[in-house]
Structures are given as C-alpha cells and as structure tokens.
C-alpha cells in the first residue's frame, strides 16, 4: 500500500499501491475514464492537483527526480490521493504513460459519494494508506525537509478523515435511540465471535415489549422512546462482561448471554422480566416501562443467525400468546417436536 505523493528514496523498497476488488468496483462507479497515449504525460512535478487516479489498463511511471526511486503503477494501482484529500497539492513526480493507458480519475465529488455510499470500506482504504504514510514518515522528513509542513498537514487531514469515517462506521452498527448495537452490529459481532471460536455455551434472549402500541397511541412517541430506553438500560444491567445487548428494531431487543446451561440462561431472562415488571408497577402516570416477554434459546456451534432467531422467536411468540410478562424456552428438541 503506498501514497504516490510520499514516495521514499531507493533505500526503501516501495510497495505497490493497489485497490482490492471490492474497492475497485466502488471506485469504478464514481471515477471518470481518462485515456493516455504511449509516453503521454499526465502531470509534472510541481503541478497543483486535486485528483486521484486508478490504473484500469496499461501503466504509469512516476519519476520523482533526483536520487529518488522511480516507480511503476500497474492495473488497479492508485496514485495522487493527497491531491484529492488536501486539494491543490503540488505533485511530487512526473506521471508518464507506459504504452496505451486507461485511468479512472476520482475527483472530490466522487470521493464524497464513496464516503456516503460505503463509509466502512473507505475507512479501511484510508487506514491502509495512512499506515503506509506513517511507516515512511521519518525517512521522508529526513530526506525532504522542505516538505515537512505539507506532510504533517496531509497526515492531520488523513487522521481527521479516518476519525470521521470511524464515527460513521460506528453509527452504522449502533442504534441511535438506545445506544445499543443495532441488528447489523449484532450480526457482525456474532460472526466475529464465530470466527474466533464456536458459540456453543451461549444463549439468545429475544425480548419484546408487551402492549407497546398502547403506550404510543395513548401517550405519544416520546413516552414510547422512554420505554425503549428503559428496556435498553435493563438489558445493560443484566449483561455480563462478554454479553451483547441489541435493539433489533421497533420494540424488539435481544441479548446474547454467555451461559453454560439452560438454567443460567433462564436466570438472566427472568431477571429482565422481573425488573421490568417491578419498574412498570412503580411508574408514574406517564409510562416509562412495560412488562416484557422473552423467548430464550441456546446457541449451537453450527447455527446460523436465521435459525437462531427463528427458534427464539418461536419461544417469544408462545410467551406473547400466553399473556406476556413471562419467559418461554425453545431448543432443538422442542422446536422439532
């Protein structure tokens, strides 16, 4: 991974800067094609640039002048990103086509479109670019001191962009009202855990507010929001160090519980139900809690999210049908009986 505008001397072997297939597919959607003939110059050292380029076909030779190493950028390689991120950045190399070359030209509007469409993917791209910049920073400062101010400004800009994208990525995984993981965040967390180790020895609690629509209809959505925030707080208090509470959507929540057996899982579920019932009994005229129904199910090592959800949902449906304010259990034996 590399940044064209920050190449090192030939004492440091540069790494080819190439997009992944997923990144290239995204950049291709917003980039504008640019054709160059053999030997044609794209830009010269010192030219002010505001664009980034990706090689589609052919190649580009970057000549940094002096005793700096030249570099060739091939298919799906990229260069010039500092011009895009900083704006009016002085190019540090001559860029010359190697044979007939097709490029994608990415401008500021395209970069903003990528940030809106795929902030997570763009964050990963920028992290790799920043990592390369940081690795070469000391050598670059020592060998090109007159560019030190520009380099630091570029790093600050890149770090600030990454922080913004990190926040955007976090928002895509977090429920704004309750601060819990949302459905996407929960499923990603579940898959990450599966990759590390089997998920056996866990349980899933699927939680639903009883008669939630009545609260919204009688007291308005602000009262409903307070109820949802109250449920989130109960789930936080019930969650252990490795447990994960989540708002799946509407008035439906879940809690991934690290528990070895049915009794331990049900003990957590009953705590949630009892706590909600106690708060519901003590609340003032404006409701701040409803009773809760919970479907509980064990998590098995070979079980995907759809199957896991369906099993817990079957137990939740039974709890609701029996009047709510209760916990029902569903395992594979019961589900197939």
Image (cartoon, rainbow, N blue to C red):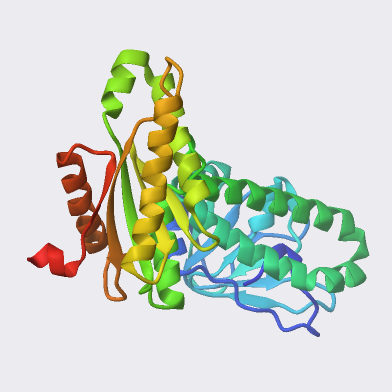
Note whether 221 is above or below 314 in the view shown. Answer: above
Q: Residue at x 54, y 70 (%)?
A: 77
Q: Residue 40, position in %: x, y?
A: 59, 65
Residue that appears at 14% across and 64% down: 334
> Visible in this render: residue 313?
yes
Is residue 255 among the parts visible in the rendering? no
Q: Return the residue nearer the eye: 24 or 227.
A: 227
Relative horizontal placement of residue 179, taking residue 302 as reference (left or right):
right
> Foreground: 61 or 233?
233
Quarter residue 302 falls in:
bottom left
Q: Position of residue 108 (x, y in %)?
A: 58, 44
Q: Nearer the viewer, residue 108 or 226?
A: 226
Count up the numbered dots: 0
Instruction: Using the image as rendered, state which of residue 51 and residue 208 is in the foreground.
Output: 208
Give the quadrant of the C terminus.
bottom left
Q: Could you tell me residue 244's position as x and y percent?
A: 46, 56
**In which quadrant is the N terminus drawn?**
bottom right
Residue shown at 41%/55% (left/top)?
268
Left or right placement of residue 124 versus residue 147 in this view: left
The quarter of the picture where residue 303 lies is bottom left
**Residue at (51, 47) in percent of width and height:** 236
Q: Is residue 1 left or right of residue 188?
A: right
> Residue 252: percent from the left, percent from the top?
32, 41
Where 99 sits versus 335, above or below? below
């Amino acid at each position: 991974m590399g940044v064209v505008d920050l190449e090192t001397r030939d004492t440091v072997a540069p790494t080819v800067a190439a997009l992944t297939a997923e990144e290239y597919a995204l950049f291709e959607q917003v980039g504008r094609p640019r054709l160059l003939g053999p030997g044609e110059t794209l830009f010269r050292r010192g030219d002010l640039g505001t664009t980034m380029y990706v090689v589609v076909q052919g190649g580009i030779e970057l000549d940094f002048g002096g005793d700096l190493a030249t570099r060739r950028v091939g298919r799906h390689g990229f260069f010039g990103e500092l011009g895009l991120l900083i704006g009016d950045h002085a190019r540090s190399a001559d860029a010359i086509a190697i044979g007939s070359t097709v490029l994608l030209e990415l401008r500021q509007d395209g970069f903003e479109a990528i940030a809106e469409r795929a902030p997570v993917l763009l964050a990963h791209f920028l992290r790799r670019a920043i990592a390369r910049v940081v690795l070469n920073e000391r050598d670059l400062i020592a060998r090109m001191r007159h560019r030190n101010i520009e380099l630091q400004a570029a790093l600050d800009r890149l770090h600030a962009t990454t922080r913004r994208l990190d926040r955007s990525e976090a928002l895509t995984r977090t429920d704004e009202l309750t601060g819990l993981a949302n459905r996407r965040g929960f499923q990603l967390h579940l898959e990450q855990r599966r990759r590390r180790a089997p998920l056996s020895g866990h349980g899933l609690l699927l939680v639903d507010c009883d008669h939630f629509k009545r609260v919204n209809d009688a007291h308005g959505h602000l009262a409903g929001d307070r109820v949802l925030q109250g449920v989130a707080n109960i789930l936080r208090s019930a969650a252990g160090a490795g447990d994960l509470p989540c708002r799946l959507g509407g008035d439906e929540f879940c809690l991934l519980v690290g528990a070895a057996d049915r009794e331990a899982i049900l003990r957590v579920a009953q705590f949630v139900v009892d706590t909600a019932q106690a708060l519901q009994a003590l609340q003032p005229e404006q409701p701040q809690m409803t009773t809760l129904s919970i479907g509980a199910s064990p998590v098995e090592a070979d079980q995907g999210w759809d199957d896991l959800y369906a099993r817990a949902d079957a137990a939740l449906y039974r709890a609701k049908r029996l009047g709510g304010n209760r916990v029902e259990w569903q395992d594979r034996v019961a589900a197939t009986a």
